[in-house]
């Protein structure tokens, strides 16, 4: 296996390991209290790209992706996000979870992200988490606090901070994602493995420590070790999960296994939209459905992500999505025109780019150059495009849809051509707007106007 990916702990590319020809992967999944936005989807695409590249090399992949439907606290640390959304929508919290979980899988399908082998839910893994918490207490890595909640003893794990670079002695009380326990913990950087129910009436379970609910971090340790036989070759998540979630997860898992439970930690960088961080307050949260509603192929979003290195912050825009949409449409038309090839052979140039820390931007640049190279025969071009598409996942062999132009739109195009000839720019612009609202894209040049379907 020659694929090397940047490892967050060692701060350098590291070759992916396997066990008996199988690479075990764990990707932190969605918290299903709302739709995943395009920034979340960029992370989920990263795990798909890694898995596809591994498969291209001839190895198998065992992928697990959790579904967080309990245990993830809201930003004020006081209420579970599922319960918070349940109040807003006035429906049962588990109905909220199933609603957004279904929509999550629909988004994955639209982005051509191959499904994981399992999607375990936190709410259905409570016993699994309780077993791990019990084992951590026996190992003196966890304790029952004065409030009857169970906490992980952060000071018991000597190498805490290797993922994020944070030191326990430098962490201040109230650091990100930790709850306010009013002195119930031994040390302010300890975190909750199991929270006592207190006044909470919904989404609570019995436990050896009394009724309550799990903390967020314990679910990934419990699920990854259970479903991947105690060891993870590649662990994937967004850069925002590096601390404290992955730092805490590593401490929990390693305390159970007494070794490094994860070989390689991979983190995808932040996504901006038109220069700003996506947020509800800024009103710029973009969903995949928003992309589709504008008439763009959802795989145009996938191509936008591919044109940027996964561990570089990227700035997405409607213009870049529109450009990617046109590129995919052109490539599908070119491939249809180039003909067919009976057997796809490996392309060493493309493979070398992918194996070098998943350098998809260079793959896309290589294909763009190949498309224009008149010295390369069509058979070689189609081989390269289809070989690359095993990882790019742009469905480039899809037969282009030929749509006949209705008579009313033909008439409008002719009227606009006449308006341009008469230099009636106001009427020309008015007709353009009408045509574009009908699903056409209009281009003007010295030789006249041209059009295409979106």
Image: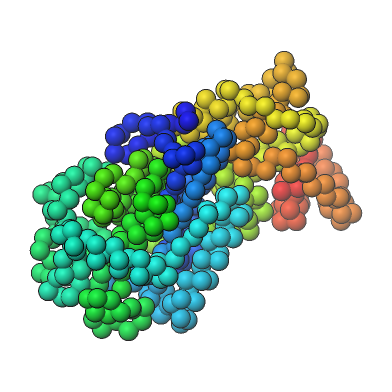
**11 in relation to 149, above or below:** above
Along the horizontal axis of the image, is 443 left or right of 223?
right
Residue 246 in view, yes or no: yes
Residue 350 image offset from top left, x and y in percent: 57, 27
The part of the image, by quadrant, that contains residue 264 is top left
The residue shown at (14%, 53%) is 156
The part of the image, by quadrant, that contains residue 154 is bottom left
Along the horizontal axis of the image, is 86 left or right of 392?
left
Residue 184 image offset from top left, x and y in percent: 12, 70
Residue 176 image offset from top left, x and y in percent: 24, 58
Residue nearest the viewer, comparing 299 with 244: 244
**348 in relation to 167, above or below:** above
**236 in relation to 14, above or below:** below
Residue nearest the viewer, comparing 21 with 280: 21
Residue 341 image offset from top left, x and y in percent: 77, 30
Residue 276 in view, yes or no: no
The residue shown at (26%, 69%) is 194
């Amino acid at each position: 296996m020659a694929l090397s990916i940047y490892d967050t702990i060692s701060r350098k590319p590291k070759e992916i390991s396997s066990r008996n020809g199988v690479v075990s992967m764990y990707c932190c999944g969605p918290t299903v209290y709302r739709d995943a936005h395009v920034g979340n989807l960029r992370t989920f695409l990263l795990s798909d790209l890694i898995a596809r590249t591994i498969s291209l090399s001839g190895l198998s992949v065992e992928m697990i992706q959790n579904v967080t439907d309990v245990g993830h606290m809201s930003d004020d640390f006081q209420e579970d996000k599922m319960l918070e959304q349940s109040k807003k929508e006035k429906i049962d919290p588990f109905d909220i979870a199933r609603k957004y979980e279904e929509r999550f899988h629909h988004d994955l399908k639209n982005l051509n992200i191959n499904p994981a082998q399992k999607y375990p839910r936190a709410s259905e893994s409570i016993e699994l988490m309780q077993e791990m918490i019990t084992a951590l207490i026996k190992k003196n890595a966890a304790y029952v606090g004065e409030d009857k909640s169970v906490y992980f003893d952060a000071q018991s794990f000597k190498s805490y901070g290797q993922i994020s670079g944070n030191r326990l002695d430098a962490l201040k009380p109230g650091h990100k994602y930790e709850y306010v326990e009013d002195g119930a913990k031994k040390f302010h950087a300890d975190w909750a493995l199991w929270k006592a129910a207190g006044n909470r009436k919904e989404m609570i379970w019995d436990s050896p420590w009394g009724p309550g609910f799990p903390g967020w971090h314990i679910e990934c340790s419990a699920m990854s070790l259970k479903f991947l036989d105690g060891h993870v070759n590649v662990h994937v998540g967004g850069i925002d999960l590096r601390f404290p979630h992955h730092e805490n997860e590593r401490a929990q898992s390693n305390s159970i296994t007494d070794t490094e439970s994860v070989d390689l930690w991979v983190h995808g960088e932040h996504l901006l939209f038109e220069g700003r961080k996506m947020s509800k307050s800024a009103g710029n949260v973009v969903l995949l459905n928003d992309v589709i509603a504008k008439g763009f192929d959802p795989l145009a979003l996938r191509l936008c992500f591919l044109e940027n290195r996964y561990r570089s912050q990227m700035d997405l825009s409607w213009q870049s999505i529109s450009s990617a949409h046109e590129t995919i449409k052109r490539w599908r038309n070119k491939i249809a025109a180039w003909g067919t090839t009976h057997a796809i052979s490996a392309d060493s140039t493309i493979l070398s780019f992918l194996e070098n820390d998943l350098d998809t931007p260079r793959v896309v640049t290589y294909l763009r150059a190949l498309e224009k190279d008149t010295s390369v025969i069509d058979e070689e071009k189609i081989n390269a495009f289809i070989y690359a598409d095993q990882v790019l996942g742009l469905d480039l062999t899809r037969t282009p849809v030929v749509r006949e132009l209705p008579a009313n739109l033909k008439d409008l195009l002719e009227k606009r051509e006449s308006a341009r000839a008469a230099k009636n720019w106001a009427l020309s612009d008015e007709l353009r707007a009408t045509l574009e609202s009908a699903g056409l894209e209009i281009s003007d040049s010295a030789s006249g106007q041209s059009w295409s379907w979106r």
